[in-house]
Image (cartoon, grey):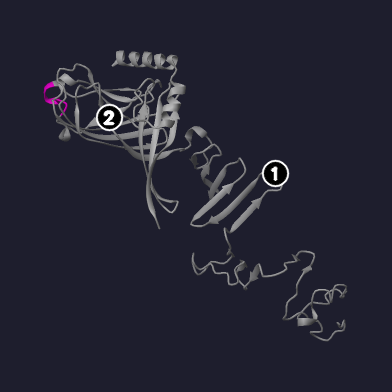
Amino acid sequence: MYNSGNSSKNVTGASVVDGTLENADFADNGLSGDKIDGGIVSNFQSTGIDDRQTSGKVLYLDGTNVGISASSPDLSGFGSSSRGLEINNAQPTIRLKDTGGSSDDFYLVQAGADTYFYSKSNGKMRFNINGSERMRILPTGGITFNGDAAAANALDDYEEGTWTPELANGTSITYNSQSGKYVKIGSVVHVECYINVSNSSTGDGSNVAVSGLPYSVDILSGSACPTFGINIYDNTFLDIATHGAAHLNFLSTALVLDFTYSQCNTSGKLRMSATYRV
Amino acid sequence: MALSKTTVVDKVETLENGTIQVRTATRIDEDGTVLSSSFHRHTLSPGQDLTNEDPKVVAIASAVWTPEVVSAYEATVAAQEASV
């Protein structure tokens, strides 16, 4: 079935089939050059390759790129100069497994429209540029920058949304409009709100307080010092002309002004902002 | 291709002094895939009226707001107000 002589292409095409050459013993380099040229070599193992695929192809080489389940690997979507590896399959995944740890696994996955950088280990995820760490994701959550390893410095939250401001302590207040927005960056919250009221009782001696805050205020820290501002051009509720500028103190869940309802108009608008820590 | 809008209390945070922070998410989704979402927040102080609150929030508040927690919070607020 085969010729171990030196004539070229003595083992080709259909002559190389499963079983036929099972016990063939070629001399070293006996199959070098073009002695296998054309046809399909199936179900074989070599020192470095194990191909016992029973059907279909998995690995493709086109001279510049490698395809896994991609017969014509094409990386030009990033740029025409791109060369490398394309995996074209359902939920294509690359797994990086450190043999030194049982759970030190990292997966790069494309699942539908979503891309995952998925680490199963409990370590940091670092992003370096030109040898220097520029960003790090801590296993406990949060992002640090430029090699900073302190969890206290990790940017661990960002959120924005709305809240509904209310005037606490007031009497028989009718709300014509209530709106508020917030942004939380780390442990700092910035809130803005607009209230338009009528029917407020000027006989009420309690302090004006804006409640409904999106986050509780950290008032226990020794250095806590929330700040606030009132848009005087859109304030017709606090009678600042008569009673002077407003000052602010904070309770856990309210902004408390040093104005009483008796120092306010019956109707009017109040637009204010505040920044505090949580 | 069915669009739907849902509103759900998606986060309830309980602080050390018993204050509860509630986040309500409004989601627009298409066939189960969330296309957009927005958040609305409010806070509840220990002892505060829970009318119209989500049952999950009521359950948590009922568990957390023991008479001791409420009285401790009220004492803290009273001290704060005294300093205003």
C-alpha distance separating marks 2 and 1: 52 Å
| Residue under numbered circle 1 | A102
Q: What amino acid does circle 1 point to?
A: Ser
Can residue A261 be seen here? Answer: yes
Q: Are callouts 2 and 1 both on one chain?
A: yes
Q: What amino acid does circle 2 point to?
A: Phe
Please name whichever residue, A23 or A170, is drawn nearer the observer in this view of the structure. Answer: A170
Label 2 resides on the chain identified as A
Q: Which span is picked out in magenta?
A: A237-242
Residue placed furthest toward the left = A242
| Residue under numbered circle 2 | A228
Please name whichever residue, B37 or A45, is drawn nearer the observer in this view of the structure. Answer: B37
> Dot 1 lies on which element?
loop
Query: Could you classify mark 2 by the number of other residues whose Cα lies within 10 Å: few (under 14), some (14-19), or many (20 or more)?
Result: some
Image position of A246 with respect to A32: above or below: above
Q: Is residue A143 found left or right of A162 in the rendered image?
A: right
Give the residue drawn at x 11%, y 22%. Answer: A242
Residue A218 placement (x, y as % from top left): 39, 25
Label 1 resides on the chain identified as A
Q: Give the quarter of the image for residue B11.
A: top left
Please name whichever residue, A273 or A166, is drawn nearer the observer in this view of the structure. Answer: A166
Q: Is residue A49 found left or right of A187 in the rendered image?
A: right
Give the residue drawn at x 54%, y 39%. Answer: A138
Q: Is residue B81 magenta?
A: no
Query: Could you classify mark 1 by the number of other residues whose Cα lies within 10 Å: few (under 14), some (14-19), or many (20 or more)?
Result: few
Residue A157 placement (x, y as % from top left): 44, 38
Can residue B16 be seen here? Answer: no
Image position of B25 with respect to A172: above or below: below
